[in-house]
């Protein structure tokens, strides 16, 4: 499971670095008017939240299957709450280019949802494989 955790962290970091730099390049090359100063914080936020998610999922193998589903739903809820807090801070404190921030934030949120689902799928497969080998 430790090897899977390392693989997921590398995959998550690479995906967010590539999408972060790619989004930055697109905004700088084609939409420089819409670039906002807080852009780098969005991929950093999702990188941080993703690493926490992966670390918690690493402990799932010790739980029974019912608890892992509950934990997964709790992680999803806490991610939504953290995202709302992050976006709320921007909307209420910064108040600059709200539409641009919202579009970029939602784009990264959807990317993160896709990655998160894939991580849970890989973790569940690893747990099933370990149970068959036992």
Image: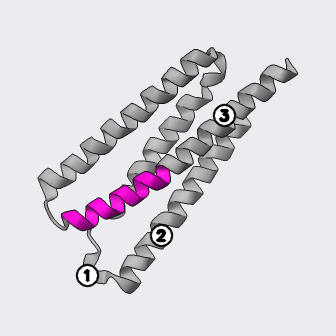
**Quadrant of the frame with the N terminus:** top right
Residue 47, image x, y percentages: 47, 50
> Looking at the image, which residue is at 26% across and 67% down?
100
Q: The residue tagged with tag 2: helix, strand or loop?
A: helix
Residue 59, image x, y percentages: 60, 24
**Which residue is labeled 1 in the image?**
33
Q: Are marks 3 and 2 in contact (CB under 8 Å)?
A: no
> Looking at the image, which residue is at 51% across and 58% down?
16
Along the line of sight, the residue nearer the viewer: 2 or 78: 78
Residue 78, image x, y percentages: 37, 32
Name which quarter of the figure residue 4 lies in. top right
> N-terminal of the two: label 1 or label 3?
1
Q: Closer to the observer: label 3 or label 2?
A: 3
**Distance from label 2 to label 1 (Cα)?**
17 Å
Q: The residue tagged with tag 3: helix, strand or loop?
A: helix
**Quadrant of the frame with the C terminus:** top right
Q: Magenta segment: does it hold 76? A: no
**The magenta segment:** 98-112
**Which residue is labeled 3 in the image?**
123
Q: Magenta segment: does it hold 103? A: yes
Question: For the stretch drawn in magenta, what is the main secondary structure?
Answer: helix
- The residue furthest bottom is 29
> Looking at the image, which residue is at 48% across and 47% down?
113
Name which quarter of the figure residue 14 lies in. bottom right
Near mark 1 (Cα within 10 A), the count class, few <14, some 14-19 or many ≥20, is: few
Q: Which mark is residue 19?
A: none
Query: Can I make out residue 73 in this image?
Result: yes
Near mark 3 (Cα within 10 A), the count class, few <14, some 14-19 or many ≥20, is: many
Name which quarter of the figure residue 121 lies in. top right
**Which residue is labeled 2 in the image?**
21
Residue 94, image x, y percentages: 15, 58
**Distance from label 3 to label 2 (Cα)?**
28 Å
């Amino acid at each position: 499971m430790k090897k899977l955790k390392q693989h997921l962290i590398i995959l998550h970091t690479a995906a967010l670095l590539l999408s972060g730099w790619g989004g930055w390049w697109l905004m700088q090359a084609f939409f420089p008017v819409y670039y906002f100063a807080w852009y780098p914080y969005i991929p950093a936020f999702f990188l941080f939240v993703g690493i926490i998610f992966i670390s918690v999922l690493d402990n799932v193998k010790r739980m029974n299957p019912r608890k892992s589903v509950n934990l997964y739903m709790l992680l999803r809820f806490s991610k939504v709450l953290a995202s709302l807090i992050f976006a709320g801070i921007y909307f209420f404190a910064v108040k600059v280019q709200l539409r641009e921030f919202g579009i970029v934030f939602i784009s990264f949120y959807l990317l993160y949802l896709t990655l998160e689902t894939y991580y849970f799928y890989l973790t569940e497969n690893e747990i099933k494989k370990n149970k068959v080998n036992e």
